[in-house]
Each structure stands twice: as structure tokens, then as C-alpha cells.
Amino acid sequence: MYPQGNNAQLNFSGLGCWLTVIGFAWLLGALGLGWLVKSIAVLLVLLLVAPVIGFLGFRWWLNRNLIEGACPVCQTSLTGLNKMRTVCPNCQTPLQVTLEGFQRDVPEGTVEVDAVDITDDTRDATVVSVEVLPPVEEDR
């Protein structure tokens, strides 16, 4: 059976939360709320201005680093970022993007030659002339 008598109990489980809220309100009242309002206003201004500054900064960077030119092999119009490597979508030639335009990205030690076939009018012999091009200076 249930015991008879006075079973009154005190419950202080929510008292710590209320004391924290009251203490925080007292602290804000003692220090003043001007600094809080000003800091919220500064945060709102930063949230509104930061995307505009970021967009203008990105446009400036893109203007300086976006290079348009033609592939040196097949003359296809290309666009790339400065100091990046890319591949021509038309002829699959590996290219290096520089401020001057697009240059072939050849492995170290490769000799670039330009072969020209010249035929003699007398058709007695075919003369082939090979011109060796100077190596391309690379900015790596």
C-alpha cells in the first residue's frame, strides 16, 4: 500500500537555467546595449558588402588571367587560364597557356623541326630541306 503522510518535494532542476538568463540580462543592463547594437550593425554591413567585394575581386583576377588565343597546330580558337596546361579539343595537342597565348607543351629534349618538301621542275630529283627551330623557352 501507499504510505500515508506529507510527500511534498521541492524541484530545483530549472533554477540554474533561469539564474543564467537573469545574470546575463543583469550583465547587459550593467554594461549597456550600445555595443551590442553596433556590433550587429557592423555584421549586417559586412554580410551585405562582402559578396560585392568578392565578385569584383574575382572579375579583376579573371580579367588578368583569362587568355584567349588559337592553337599553334590547328588554329582552333581556345580559352584558358594563365600558367595552366590544357589539351586542344580539336587536334589533342598538349598546350601550355602563357600571357602571349598558347604554346605546344613538348617534353624536355624534344627537337622541333619544320620539314618542307621542295620538288625540282626538271623532275630529276626531289630535294628536301629541313630547318631546325630553336628550342622554346618555357616559364616553369
Image (cartoon, rainbow, N blue to C red):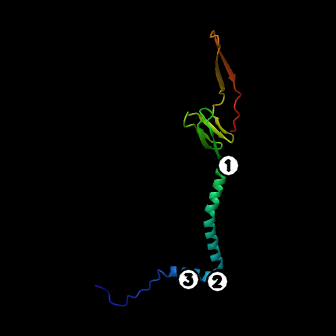
Q: Amino acid at mark 1?
A: Arg
Residue 82 versus residue 40: which sits nearer the camera? 82
SS class of the residue under badge 1? Answer: helix
Q: Is residue 19 left or right of residue 103?
A: left
Q: Amino acid at mark 3?
A: Ile
Up/down of 12 relative to 63, above or below: below
In front: mark 3 or mark 1? Answer: 1
Badge 3 or badge 2: first in the primary sequence: 3
Query: Residue 127's spot in the image, x, y percent?
Result: 65, 14
Up/down of 129 relative to 8, above or below: above
Residue pointed to by mark 1: 64
Q: For residue 102, which quarter of the picture?
A: top right
Residue pointed to by mark 2: 30
Query: Residue 21's spot in the image, x, y percent?
Result: 54, 80
Residue 71 versus residue 39: which sits nearer the camera? 71
Residue pointed to by mark 3: 22
Q: Residues within 10 Å of mark 2 (few under 14, many from 20)?
A: few
Q: Residue at x 63, y 67 (%)?
A: 46
Q: Residue at x 52, y 81 (%)?
A: 18
Badge 3 or badge 1: first in the primary sequence: 3
Q: Mark 3 to mark 2: distance in Å?
A: 12 Å
In front: mark 1 or mark 2? Answer: 1
SS class of the residue under badge 2? Answer: helix
Q: Mark 3 to mark 1: distance in Å?
A: 57 Å
Counting every numbered tag in the picture gives 3
Q: Amino acid at mark 2?
A: Ala
Query: Residue 29's spot in the image, x, y percent?
Result: 62, 83
Badge 1 or badge 2: first in the primary sequence: 2
Query: Residue 67's spot in the image, x, y percent?
Result: 64, 44
Q: Quadrant of the C terminus?
A: top right
Q: For residue 125, which quarter of the picture?
A: top right
